[in-house]
Amino acid sequence: MISAFVDFREEVVSRRTKFLLGKARDRAHVLVGLAIAVANIDEMIRIIRSAPDPQSARDALMGRDWPAYDMAPLVALIDDPRHPVSDAGIVRLSETQARAILDLRLQRLTALGRDEIAEELNALAVEIADYLEILRSRIRIMEIVGNELATIKAAHATPRRTIIVDYDSDVDDEDLIAREEMVVTVSHAGYIKRVPLSTYRAQRRGGKGRSGMATRDEDFVARLFVASTHAPVLFFSSRGRVYKEKVWRLPLSAPQARGKALVNMLPLEGDERINTIMPLPENEADWDKLDVMFATRDGNVRRNKLSDFVNVNRAGKIAMKLDEGDAIVDVQMCTDRDDVLLTTTKGQGIRFSVDEVRVFKGRDSTGVRGISLAKEDHVISMAILRHVDATAEERAAYIKMRRAVTGETTADEVETEVEDTGLPETSLSQERYAELSALEQVVLTISQNGYGKRTVAYEIRTTGRGGKGIVTMIVNDRNGPIVGSFPVETSDQIMLVTDGGQLIRCPIEGIRIAGRNTQGVIVFNTADDEKVVSVERVTDTGEDDEAGDAPAEAGDDAHPSTDVPDAG
C-alpha cells in the first residue's frame, strides 16, 4: 500500500511539473517576442505606422525575418518546433508574439521596462531548465515527494498508539491463502483462469449446466481440471523449459470470463509455447514416487523423477536439453506399469514399456531414442497407455471376438498384424474376454485432411524402444499426414481446427473403430485449400443454466447429482 501511495505521489509531481513547464514556456515565448521588438524598435514602429489596420500590422510582423540576437538559446529552451531559429540566426514571430507586440505599452520601452523583460526572461530560463531536470531525474522527483510527505507529516502527524515489534516467524503469502478447490480452465489459444468449485452448484441429472469460459469463435476450452489453491502446476514449453505456479497465483475470474493469456503470465520467448500443463499433488514429498516422460519432435524420450522439478523459480528452468531444431511434443506422468505410444506424421507408431527408458538423474540430457524416424518425418504425439499382459494370440483372439460382437469388421480393412503373422488361433474364455475388455483402451488418430478413426490399443503391439514402429494409420494423398493421436473414451468429444480458422466439434462415438492399417472415415470435411492443424479432446462445459435445474426424466430417481466440470 505504501509503495502504491508513493507511486501515486510520484505521478502527481510529474504531472504538476509538466503543467508548470508548459506555462513557463508559454510566458517565455511571449517575452522573447517582446525582447525582439525592443531590440528592433525602430523597424517595428515603422511597420506598425505604415499598416492600415491591426490585422495588416500583425501579418506584416509575422511575415518577415527578425534577427534573434542573444535570444537564440532561449528560443531553443522554449522548444517550439513551429518557430525555430534558423542557421542564419533569424526567427519569425508567432501570432501570439505579434499580438503581444501590438499590445505593448510605450512605458515598457524605457530602460527600466527593457530590464524587467530581460530579468523575467532570465528567471524563466532558469525555471524551465529546472523543470526539465526534474522530469529527467527520478531522484529529483523522489526528493520532492519526500519533502512533501515530510511537510504533510509535520502538519498532520499524531503519536503512534500501536507498538511495533520484531516478528521472527516465517509467514509466506501462501500461508494466508485459504484452502479451496478450484476449477482451472485452459483454452486452445492459451488463456487460463480459475473459478471456485463452489460456483458450479449441483444440479439434477439432465440439467443444462452453465458456461465454463467465454471464448471467441476461433477458441475453445481445451483443458479443465480441479485442484486445491495450494496445489502446484507445471507448465512445460516447446523450448524445453518448465515453469511452476501455485493454483492460487492463477488469475481468479468469473465463470463467463475469458481469463488471462499465458504469454502475459510466464516469461515466454519468441515462438515458445506451452505444450503441457500438469497439475501435481500438493504434497511435494510424494513427488519422488512419480515419474514424468518427455517426448520430442525428433523422436527422443526421457524419463525423470517428478521430484527433479520441485525447485522451479518464477523465471523457469531447463526441463530438457534439446538439439538444434528439436522441440518438446508432450510431457506426461507415468509409472512402471505403463506403456509409451509415439506416433509420427507419416502414420508410424511405436509402443514400448516405460521401463525401457531408464530414470535420468539430471535435466541437461537429450534423452534416448524412442523411435527411428524416416526422412522428413517427426513425432506428432505421445500417449501413455496401460500395460496389459496379454500374448499375441490372446490379443488376436480378443480383437476377432470383439469385432464379431460389435459387427465392426468391414471389407476395406487390411488384416491386423497379429493375424498376418500366422500365429495359431486361440479362443478366450468369457472371463478372460471380460478382463481384457475392462482394460481396453481406444486410440483416436486424425489426419491433416480431416480423416480419422479409433483403433483398439491391443492392435498396437508392444516392442522394444528405438525401432521404426508399425503403421497406425495409412498416410496417402487422401488422408494427408497425421496431426494427432491419443486415447479417448466413448463419452468424449473432440474439436478440430483448420489453418483457415474453421472449427468443428463432434462426439467420439460417431467415429468408427477400425484396424490400425486402415484409412479411417471423414471427420471434418475441409475445404480444398485448408488442412487440419490441431485436434483436442474437449470438456463439455455446457450453456448457462438460465431456466434453473432441469427436471429428471420420468422414472428417474429424484436424487441430485453433482454435475461439476470434469476433472479429466
Image (cartoon, rainbow, N blue to C red):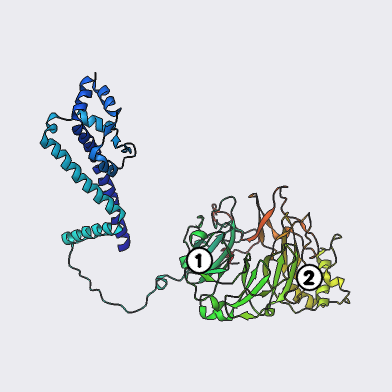
Say how many tags the image has. 2
User: Where does the image place residue 321, in percent across and percent down from the top left?
Assistant: 59, 72
* Residue type at numbered disc 2: Glu
State the SS at label 1.
strand
Q: Which residue is mark 2?
A: 459
Give residue 125's quadrant in the image: top left
Residue name at image x 40 percent, y 71 percent: 173
Q: Is residue 1 visible?
A: no
Residue name at image x 25 percent, y 74 percent: 164
Residue nearer the viewer, 291 or 328: 328
Residue nearer the viewer, 461 or 440: 461
Residue nearer the viewer, 287 or 494: 287
Residue nearer the viewer, 111 or 302: 111
Quadrant location of the C terminus in the rendered image: bottom right
* Residue type at numbered disc 1: Met
Give the numbered dot on residue 182: 1
Residue name at image x 20 percent, y 36 percent: 35
Vertical relation: 191 (above or below) 440: above
Give residue 177's quadrant in the image: bottom left
Vertical relation: 470 (above or below) 91: below
Going by the picture, which residue comes out furthest to the front?
88
N-terminal-most mark, 2 or 1: 1
Vertical relation: 471 (above or below) 170: above
